[in-house]
Image: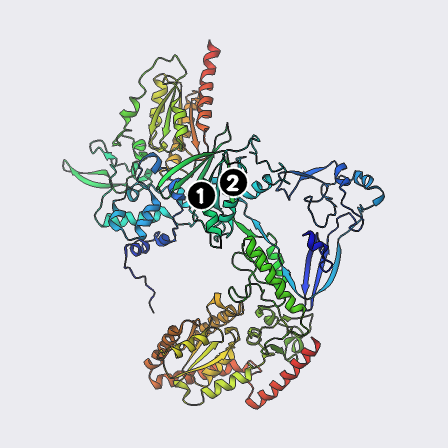
Amino acid sequence: MVDAARQPRIDVRAFTEVEKVEGFVGNFKVTLREKAKHVLADRCNGCGDCAKVCPIEVPNHYELNLAPRKAAYVPMSQSVPLIYSIDLDACIHCYKCVEACGSLEAIDFSQEDKIVEEDIGAIVVATGFSHFDPSVMEEYGYGRFPNVITSMEMERLNNSAGPTMGNLIRPSDRRNPQRIAFINCVGSRDKRYIPSCSNFCCMYSIKNAVLLKQMNPSVDITIYYMDIRTPSKGYEEFYDRAREMGIHFIQGRPSLITEDEATHNLFVHSEDITLGRVIENEYDMVMLNQAAIPQPDQNHMSSVLNVAQSPGGWFMEYHPKLRPIDSPTDGIFFAGACQGPKDIPSSVAQGSAAASRASRILLSERWEIEPIVAVVWPERCTATTKGRACGLCVKACPYGAVVIEGDKAAEIITAKCHGCGGCVAECPEDAISQLHYTDAQLLSQIRALLADKPEEKILALRCHWCSYGGADLAGTSHFEYTANERGIKVMCSARMDSDFIYEAYRLGAGAVLFSGCHPQDCHYITGQIIGAKRAVRLKKIFERMEMTEGRFRVEWISAAEGDKYARVLNEMQDVLDKMSPEQLQEEIARLKPEMEKRLKRFPGVPGVPEAMLYSDNLVDAILKSKEIA
Amino acid sequence: MSHSIMIRTFADEVKSIPGGEHLELCYSCGTCVSKCMIQQKVEPDYNPRRLLRLAIMDLKDEAFKSPTTWMCSECDLCYQACPQEIHISQVIAAVKKLAVEAGYTSPLTPVSVDEELCSGCGICVMVCPYEAPSLYEKEHNGDLDRLSEVDANKCMRCGTCVGACPLGAIAREGVSNTEITSQFGYVIPHNPLLVAFVCDWSLREDADVSLLESYPEDQVKIVHIPCTGRIDPQHALMALDSGINGVLVCGCKPGECHFKRGNHVAKCKISLLDAMLKQMQLNDKNIRLVQIGTQERGRIKYEVDDMLSTLKAPKEAIA
């Protein structure tokens, strides 16, 4: 940290919050709130005279409230930068610090928060993690029994710069404990609290146990665990070393801790799973290895940065295997535990990777993106026609690439667009189009495929990343399926416009398949969810029209499910085979006016020549937007 | 397309019964075993985790013969503690249901009903937490008599019905009326003498049990009962009548009763008894109910000492 602060090209901004992030890769505008320290940074030399004279003591958050600090303070003596600050919530305004500071005149009570705006090329998020509060687990008595502490508190007690100068003592009587138990998985792997594994606690508890045993070999240490997870290089060997040192390991999750009121000794009740027997052991001190949880303000950060969160609340990476460091927004990267619980080596590795990903952006003049971005035709946007933009496109975009400012037409930040086409399909005015996947292009494909005997055809809409791959696999694996299938590829199920399906039925298609990725596999974060919502809506509409069940089908097929693709199409063929040709013709004729009615509501559905014109407009538009960028 | 579950194995059978669905979520952490007191107190072979394991591994006969199948009293302490939120007692109930269907019977001796005394009032049916007793009609001397009978596979032997039967028609070995009253015969009141009705499950730790047993016999007389639901207000009154100074009823904390709701029944009985003593202008402080939680190690000593000192106080004043 000191090295980083000394490096001339690194600017450390302590006590500063990110308020707003605007812009896109290479051109972020970040608004920062530099909080008032009430000490002038350029004058304070870190001598600490103000803290010496300060009469107020409050718990020190850095020491997990195990030690006090003054109202004029630095959280720890190694703080970087070493500039004191005055905690006005605790200060009694005696101004003794002002006197002590003397001719330096570094203390300024009139200082206020400062808002600064910075131009930033790339952002690395490394906000870390927080800890589960075990006091909600009544069975372990944390907060009620003085000698039940968390392992983080133990770290402070065992630290030579900590409140006890590295002397591990029992909070109840300040004796050194002789019998110590560690309990793993407190709150983690527990459906009632944090269902996931916290990744590093096994190694962390073994590390602490070995440390304590090395300092005092006579200490009796037991680790209660459910499973010991030592997946990385050298970890299993370390676990072996701990066993050789005489640290006891008991497989069994303790269900209860009780306390002797006189001695404050603790009794841990658990099953020894290998023996199949309930055991009760007495300890002087019990340490809980709590679960790692996201920072309390992680939700706020995720909305500031416009990055999504995984189900556990951690920041979500672009792709768990292929792009584990990138956020879905280009130019924002994750390092360390803000993206999921991680141990130190993985955090360091991810930090280095994030730095090199970021420098890729900083070192390049131009940033190339796929040419399949969305473009707006502003004359058609409701902002122009009705005076106010409807905003459906903004809701549909998983990347925050669509912006509506005031009563202006929607705008796409081209650099942020990944080309899923969700906004395009959602736009009720057909005012947005996607290059290379324009409505005109897709409609002419549909018309061509359904030109001859449409009632025999099954039109399959497939997403590029999954169901198209599934169809491919069905072909390369030689799975037999109906020859009446006619496929169209779009980038994501979010692009599958209702118009396409209405148009297919208007032309007399026998059946339509709406297929995409499984929800968790979507390449465009939430694209599948947008597509699925639309598919469910369509299904209901067709049900109300009394269309034969099975003529419209929604299936989520991954790239590995070639067999499923073949099966689904065969089942759809069966539906058509069961209907007599007259019956099918009658139904198509009956539904045709319905479809026409729905298609009339849209200004779109241009003919092919018109579409060519439309595409020219789009190319103009994209060229223009590039110039601006 | 049909999505019905294929029943191929014993585990599938258990999972198809409502409550047994989450069987295979168990990752064998052992929390249930140490939370439950049956293994420590009664049966060393009792182990819910192992029963779940037997079911998962399709060891049907072993599961049916396991004491765990028959001895679980559905207190659900393990359900509250299970990190996988498996309703373990429901899984065990599912195994038990299959065992009963397969013709196995419970190894526990159920309470017995004396047909001569039973009037068929149905109080036992209302009070039983397990729906074990039911009424049936039997011909007796040309008349149809309504009688109670107990389902041996459902009875968990808590004795709540024994304490509730107004005619003393139900008996459970070890805690029948005579067996309890014979433990405190008439005594000369020379000493503050306390009789403590102690529920077998309320003192979790052996240390607490030996603490209680460390009091001399002429100060504290301990009567073990399977559940505070078993206590009979008459026993308390008989104790006071026979020269004993105070009655302490020691049970489990609300929500932790080993037999679902026996401690609630006890609380109702004791508050009624208090009201009665007040009406009779007797000291209602001499009968007390304490409910001890699993984490309240050592509390029993404070309670007994406190009771003994209140019993002593007026004596000294007289002297």
Around disc 2, counting alpha carbons within 10 Å, would you say few (fewer than 14), some (14 to 19), or many (20 or more)?
many
Q: Is residue A140 left or right of residue A120?
A: left
Q: Nearer the viewer, residue A414 or B218?
A: A414
Image quadrant in which you'd find residue A167: top right
The reply to the same-chain question for discs 2 and 1 is yes
Q: Which residue is mark 2?
A: A287
Tell me the chain of label 2: A
Q: Is residue B40 above or below residue A82?
A: above
Q: Position of residue A492 (x, y in %)?
A: 51, 74
Residue A191: in sight, yes or no?
Answer: no
SS label for mark 2: strand
Q: Nearer the viewer, mark 2 or mark 1?
A: 1
Q: Which residue is mark 1?
A: A243
Q: Position of residue B68 (x, y in %)?
A: 30, 43
| Residue kind at label 1, given as amino acid type | Arg
Residue B32: in sight, yes or no?
Answer: yes
Tell me the CA gap for discs 2 and 1. Answer: 19 Å
Q: Is residue A130 left or right of residue A276?
A: right
Q: Position of residue A37 (x, y in %)?
A: 75, 48
Q: Nearer the viewer, residue B20 or A177?
A: A177
Tell me the chain of label 1: A
Image quadrant in which you'd find residue B283: top left
Q: How many marks?
A: 2
Q: Position of residue B21 (x, y in %)?
A: 36, 54
Q: Quadrant of the N terminus of chain B?
A: bottom left
Taking the spot 69% from the left edge, 54% from the top edge, the residue there is: A3
Q: Is residue A436 above or below residue A225?
A: below
Q: Nearer the viewer, residue B226 or A132?
A: A132
